[in-house]
Amino acid sequence: MNDKIKMELQCPMPKFDFDVITMGHGSGGLLTHRLLKSGVFDILKNEWLDQQHDGAILDMKGKIAFSSDSYVVSPIFFPGGNIGDLAINGTVNDLAMCGANAEYLSLSFIIEEGLLMKELWQILLTIKKAAEKAGVVVVTGDTKVVEKGKGDKIFINTSGIGHVHPKASIHHNRIKEGDVIIVSGNIASHGIAIMSVREGLEFETTIVTDSKPLNHMVTSLLEKFGENIKFLRDATRGGIASVMNEVAEITSLGIYLDQKQIPIEEQVDGACEMLGLDPLYVANEGVFICIVDHETANEALHLLNSIDEYKNASIIGHVTAENKGKVIMKSKVGGNRMVNFLPGEQLPRIC
Amino acid sequence: MKYLSEYRDPMLVEDFLNEIHKITNQPWTLMEICGGQTHSLVKNGIPALLPDKITLVHGPGCPVCVTSIGIIDEAIFLAQQPDVILCSFGDMLRVPGSQKSLLEVKAQGADVRIMYSPLEAVKLAEENPNKQVVFFAVGFETTAPANALSVVLAAQSNLENYSILASHVLVPPAMEAILSDESNKIDAFLAAGHVCTIMGLDEYYPIAQKYQCPIVVTGFEPVDLLQGILMAVKQLENGEFKVENQYARSVMPQGNLIAQKTILQVFEVNDRVWRGIGNIPQSGYDVRNDFKKYNAREKFNIDIIPAEENKECISGDIMKGLKKPKQCPNFGTKCKPEHPLGAPMVSSEGACAAYYHYAQN
């Protein structure tokens, strides 16, 4: 872990038998039992985990959304967060994009032998905090340990379920010509925060991840605008360019973006320039694209901007009948360019 | 952002565009040398904003594109050797060799690492005394000083496990090769600002004189490029052929003398095969004999069968300005970034990649 990232332990770590995770912690025996009891159940304590059952029994009626995601980020600690809050927010946000509010999560770890116990502890504390912020409960999970070299410190899988908002009607087939595209905040911060640790880059102020739960904002939007919110998608891997291409492809409509309106923090923009990366393709963990009808756009933007975390939300373009299946962007200097799917990983250039 | 936003100012862009439209009377073909310039032009949609009479063709200044297939195969061979860590700039990884790319051998288990600077590779060698660290030293005059410095530093520390696979190419001999081809249509060059930041302007005066061709050393932002185009068109319309420096905020007439000294300490000028173009005399740098223990070609017995380039790729014609990417019958069909026939489709500075990713029509 990068020494520059301070660990802020909110509560003291219980005494474990080892300073590091060993194969024994995944054996199902005493070490597993102690780790789960002191490390997981006590921290995330709730009525379902207290039962220490093989699964959780839930009483749910109505329309339910279900989503799952795995988290393999490296490094596991980065400015503004760690793999723990990413794993909670990621699945919460995937559900939010379906118009659902996450209620219950599963949480599974695949830990590489040798992970420091204090790192796992820090991740668990972050998970607890992130779950509280999102208003979601971890009700079941699993822990496996793999031999050194067969993992990358820790992988996490979370799956979640939650009720779909009664007013939600989110589907790409509702997108029509003239609809307006809103981005919920500054783009590319998460990807650059990770890169800054990977590459040892330093900036005047630290660039931190944008990871956050989007469910509360989505609920507010659905509450107020209902079915006028036509489409939601969080712009994670592949950035906003990939989301826009997916929309153009699946709807066979055109997307026209205005580069001047795409919000990005100056330092993030500078880092992208330096690293030879296009911010449109850089990952976000707390930014979503919202497509609304023309009449709703300004009011929806106003609602977003009224909350500090979304104050940089912006109308970045609209849906057109021209250039079907393509994303075209008006550059800052006025020329048009195409924005394509990324054909693989973004690789830094030579000069 | 300081030194960036000023050069992307839409008002200045408009002013330069208006001026270019005003003074252009005859048809002119301009070649920007550097792939970074090509990408900036296409990414900002500038070609469509220029007068119809101005044609931009895209030069050979993409180090990834011009690195010969033989050298890619050498890098792949080295990456596959036991206990070798092959370090490379990122966008070399996708370039196809005769059989596969570095990205593919990495996926098959070779230790291939992306670096931003060769000095990181020297550090890696210090930290891993039981491994042989090889840096894939590609690039034009721009990256040569840092690559040379890595060898100087390795020599100072007496590192036994660091070497470079040098594949440097030089701009002026390539310009001459292009201009001496009778089928060339180039009226003026926008020379590469960063290359001239290192090397200065001296090498360009004889070329401008001999071929009566204006050369404007130009930067990479929209305002730079438009100002460079304006300066070149002005000369052409006036029948002049001077060397001018648009990128004066970075380029000194004499260049960076310390960098030049470091280059010459480690490298010597040699003939070089350019992918798609062929052999150009005195157009590359190789490691001098004094530093041969840091030359991967001397250190390892590189055993590969010379391979031929894919004949379906017309990258040579594109980099000589004879054709545009979309004139290639395989563009966007048989040749795509995910299965390229040649390097210009996968390099972040390649002309084909610029058209594939950004050009609307």
Image (tube, helix red, strand yellow):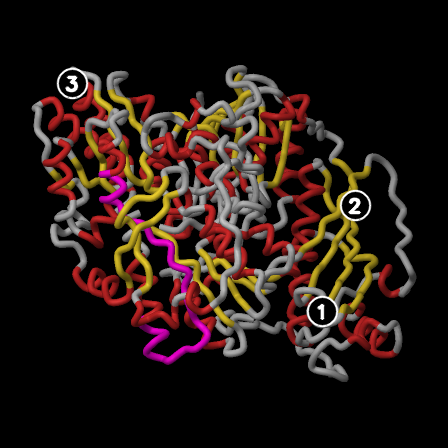
Cα–Cα gap, marks 3 and 1: 67 Å
Q: Are marks 3 and 2 on the same chain?
A: no
Between tags 3 and 2, which lies in front? 3
What residue sits right under mark 1 in the picture?
A112
Q: Position of residue A265 (x, y in %)?
A: 41, 47
Residue B173 x, y percent position in the rendering: 24, 44
Q: Which residues are magenta?
A: B152-176
Q: Residue at label 3? A: B22
Please give the name of the residue rendered at 33% of the width and 71% of the height, measured from the top-left corner. B291
Residue at mark 2 shares a chain with residue at mark 1: yes
- At 33% across and 63% down in the image, what residue appears? B287
- Whether residue A152 is visible, yes or no, is yes
The amino acid beneath tag 3 is: Lys
The dot on residue B361 is none
Find residue B263 and report its horizontal and vertical position in percent: 25, 62
Residue type indicated by callout 1: Glu
Chain identifier of the residue bearing label 3 in the image: B
According to the picture, the residue beneath numbered tag 2 turns out to be: A161
Left or right side of A265 for A129:
right
Disc 3 is placed on an element classified as: helix
Q: Residues within 10 Å of mark 1 (few under 14, many from 20)?
A: many
Label 1: which secondary element: strand
How much space separates mark 3 and mark 2, taking CA atoms? 63 Å
Residue B70 position, x and y percent, is: 46, 49
A228 is higher (above) or lower (below) than A278: above
Position of residue A113 relative to residue A193, above or below, is: below
Tag 2: residue type? Ile
